[in-house]
Image (spheres, coloured by chain):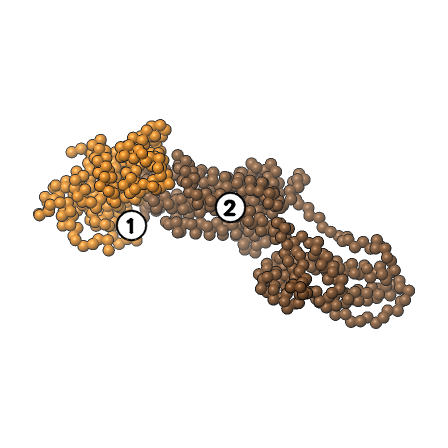
Chain colours: A orange, B brown
């Protein structure tokens, strides 16, 4: 097995004033070149885990490294090696697609003609060249999703975190995004992916972890998880079997 | 790149441009025109004052003559073709149709002459200047009262100014009456014996170094005061800008990038300080070029451009620090916008932008020194009205810069603490 790009050791998070842990002693290794699906019902701890790994909040206990870097001593190297695609359109609506990408690229130290060329190539790869000088506020949901993705990969991160990358997009945009992610992965980018589209996760992920109540309940390839539950035919069956049929966000 | 992004965002926000650049200029013009218009004959407007003449004598004529020479007040003695009665005048002023009515009592002129003549006769009799030293027994003359009816909505300062003006007018009439009576009694027809002009007058001497005379006009007060207010109003768009970054998710990208939060704040600081300087120079241009065009005194820079720019720069830094702090702490635009606007208004009130600090109650005077706007305003007045140099504004600049550093430190500390939720 290849080396662990993300190494998580007994990570816990308890929010101030909360009664229980949002994450409880979670340990996990994610390996180079994987597409790892982090699945779980609402409130299971997926967002907390991603937020900690991206440095947005601090853990209460435990530690982790990404590419061997941690936030304490080598925060800059760690940040340079990750990209994040938030579920919200994290873009400036009144700027054009190109202006947005130029700005976010510059935040990762890219500059000059090199940056401009990379941005043009990126826009071309997701069919946005004709719209590169149009303001993002005029874009459809699918176009915004594509720009949102490009903003996270301009600096060619080793690890890409995706939070619901295809939510609310049409079939064409969804296919373009998934194909693009596939190419990124084939070129060596490790992908950590959260989604409620379990069929999409089943097709896309090389390995899946099901998280519930802040703990990792199951981990394995989609096929191994399906075969581990008698009568299960898809990841959705596995998910329902493990987490129950009740609502989680009431 | 960060500065370019901020400028692009602003350039594409028409409402933001209006708030940042146009509204302060409108505010400056409006306030200065209103203040100048209070007692100047700005725009040729004259306030109409009702005169109820129950006297019908020469005092009423004198008052009418004096008022006719006044550029700001004009007398109305007839309404609907009839002389005005006191009850009508009272009602019209009460309703706010007119702001002032003057009611002259019956026999005012006649009784004043009698009163003065009796006093003059008495004095002359005592010195035996009169051929006939026997003085008739004086007739009892009741002291007269001129009634003033004010619109309840008029301000105390206006009332005081009008009362002083009428008091002076009445005193002049009385003294001239005394002189005239003396001359008549002495049989002199030549009026050169008594000079009726005021003997004692006052001359205003302003304290200025090197004998440089700068007349403290409303423009010299208002341009720096309202420019400072506009500079601090940048707190509102800046805090909204930061809250927007958080709510639309771009802050997540910025905070997960290798660029430090301090560098991110640096970009915002440079951009918004530039904006505040542009605001300031626009206000100066309005004061220098637009004021005289509409009949106001021009704003005089008098070679102090560098010092004024320096104060504006550090005031801008203080305002940006405050905006960043509010934007960092607030979670929604509904929190940051009203809070930022209210705080700016409070700091302006404390700082002496509206009411000079020396006119405030003692407790407010002590609180005024806590307002960064007070520091900036004091520095502007040092340069513009007291001819101060770099050394005189240095303490204010240090205070403004310290305020910027302190607010920035609090913002960064709060942001770090928030990560540990």
Crowding at dot 1, Cα within 10 Å, few <14 / some 14-19 / many 20+, comes out as: some
Q: Residue furthest right?
A: B131
Q: Residue furthest top?
A: A113
User: Residue drawn at (10%, 47%), measured in percent from left and top?
Assistant: A232
**Which chain's residue wears label 1?**
A
- Of residues B11 and A185, the one nearer the viewer is B11
The quadrant of the rendering that contains the N terminus of chain A is top left
Q: Is residue A248 visible?
A: yes
Kindly identify which residue carries mark 1.
Answer: A15
Residue B34: horizontal and vertical position, in percent?
58, 51
Callout 2 secondary element: helix
**Which chain's residue wears label 2?**
B
Q: In the picture shown, does residue B43 fall above or below A179?
A: below
Q: In the picture shown, does residue B177 fall above or below B272?
A: below
Does residue A144 appear to the left or right of A182 in the view shown? right
- Of residues B101 and A103, the one nearer the viewer is B101
The answer to which quarter of the image holds residue B212 is top right
The quadrant of the rendering that contains the C terminus of chain A is bottom left
Callout 1 secondary element: loop
The answer to which quarter of the image holds residue A136 is top left
User: Residue drawn at (88%, 69%), measured in percent from left and top?
Assistant: B134
- Of residues B213 and A172, the one nearer the viewer is A172
Kindly identify which residue carries mark 2.
Answer: B24
Does residue B317 appear to the left or right of A230 in the view shown? right
């Amino acid at each position: 097995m290849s080396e662990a790009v993300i190494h998580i050791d007994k990570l816990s998070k308890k929010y101030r004033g909360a009664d229980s842990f949002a994450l409880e002693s979670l340990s996990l290794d994610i390996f180079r070149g994987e597409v790892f699906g982090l699945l779980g019902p609402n409130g299971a701890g997926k967002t907390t885990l991603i937020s900690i790994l991206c440095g947005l909040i601090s853990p209460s206990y435990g530690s982790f490294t990404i590419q061997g870097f941690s936030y304490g001593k080598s925060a800059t190297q760690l940040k340079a090696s990750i990209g994040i695609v938030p579920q919200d359109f994290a873009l400036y609506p009144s700027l054009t697609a190109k202006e947005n990408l130029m700005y976010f690229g510059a935040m990762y130290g890219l500059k000059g003609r090199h940056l401009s060329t990379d941005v043009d190539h990126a826009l071309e790869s997701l069919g946005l060249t004709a719209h590169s000088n149009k303001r993002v506020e005029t874009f459809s949901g699918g176009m915004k999703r594509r720009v949102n993705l490009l903003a996270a990969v301009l600096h060619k991160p080793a690890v890409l975190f995706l939070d619901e990358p295809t939510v609310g997009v049409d079939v064409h945009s969804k296919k373009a995004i998934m194909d693009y992610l596939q190419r990124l992965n084939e070129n060596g980018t490790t992908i950590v992916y959260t989604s409620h589209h379990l069929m999409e996760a089943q097709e896309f992920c090389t390995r899946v972890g099901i998280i519930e109540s802040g703990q990792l309940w199951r981990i394995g390839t989609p096929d191994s998880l399906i075969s581990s539950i008698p009568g299960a035919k898809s990841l959705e069956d596995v998910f329902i079997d493990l987490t129950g049929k009740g609502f989680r966000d009431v | 790149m960060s500065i370019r992004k901020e400028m692009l965002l602003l350039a594409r926000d028409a409402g933001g441009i209006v708030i940042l650049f146009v509204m302060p200029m409108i505010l400056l013009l409006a306030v200065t025109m209103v203040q100048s218009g209070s007692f100047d004959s700005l725009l040729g407007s004259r306030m109409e004052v009702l005169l109820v003449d129950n006297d019908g004598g020469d005092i009423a004529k004198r008052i009418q003559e004096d008022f006719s020479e006044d550029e700001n007040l004009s007398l109305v003695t007839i309404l609907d073709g009839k002389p005005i009665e006191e009850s009508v005048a009272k009602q019209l002023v009460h309703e706010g149709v007119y702001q002032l009515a003057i009611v002259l009592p019956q026999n005012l002129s006649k009784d004043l002459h009698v009163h003065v003549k009796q006093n003059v006769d008495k004095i002359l009799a005592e010195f035996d200047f009169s051929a006939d030293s026997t003085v008739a027994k004086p007739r009892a003359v009741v002291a007269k009262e001129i009634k003033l009816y004010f619109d309840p909505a008029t301000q105390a300062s206006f009332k005081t100014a009008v009362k002083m003006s009428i008091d002076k007018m009445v005193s002049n009439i009385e003294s001239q009456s005394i002189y005239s009576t003396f001359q008549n009694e002495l049989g002199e027809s030549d009026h050169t014996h008594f000079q009726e002009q005021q003997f004692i007058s006052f001359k205003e001497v302003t304290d200025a170094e090197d004998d440089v005379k700068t007349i403290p006009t409303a423009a010299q007060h208002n341009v720096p005061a309202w420019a400072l207010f506009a500079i601090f109003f940048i707190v509102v768009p800046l805090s909204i800008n930061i809250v927007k970054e958080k709510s639309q998710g771009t802050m997540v990208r910025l905070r997960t990038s290798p660029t430090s939060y301090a560098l991110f704040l640096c970009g915002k600081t440079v951009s918004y300080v530039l904006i505040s300087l542009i605001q300031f120079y626009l206000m100066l241009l309005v004061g220098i070029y637009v004021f005289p065009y509409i009949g106001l005194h021009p704003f005089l820079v008098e070679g102090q451009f560098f010092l004024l720019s320096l104060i504006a720069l550090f005031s801008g830094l203080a305002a940006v620090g405050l905006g960043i702090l509010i934007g960092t702490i607030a979670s929604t635009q509904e929190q940051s916008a009203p809070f930022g606007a209210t705080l700016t208004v409070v700091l302006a009130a404390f700082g002496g932008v509206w009411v000079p600090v020396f006119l405030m109650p003692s407790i407010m005077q002590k609180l005024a020194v806590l307002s960064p706007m007070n520091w900036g305003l004091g520095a502007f007045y040092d340069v513009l009205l007291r001819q101060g140099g770099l050394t005189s504004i240095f303490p204010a600049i240090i205070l403004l810069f310290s305020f910027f550093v302190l607010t920035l430190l609090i913002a960064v500390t709060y942001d770090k603490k928030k990560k540990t939720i």
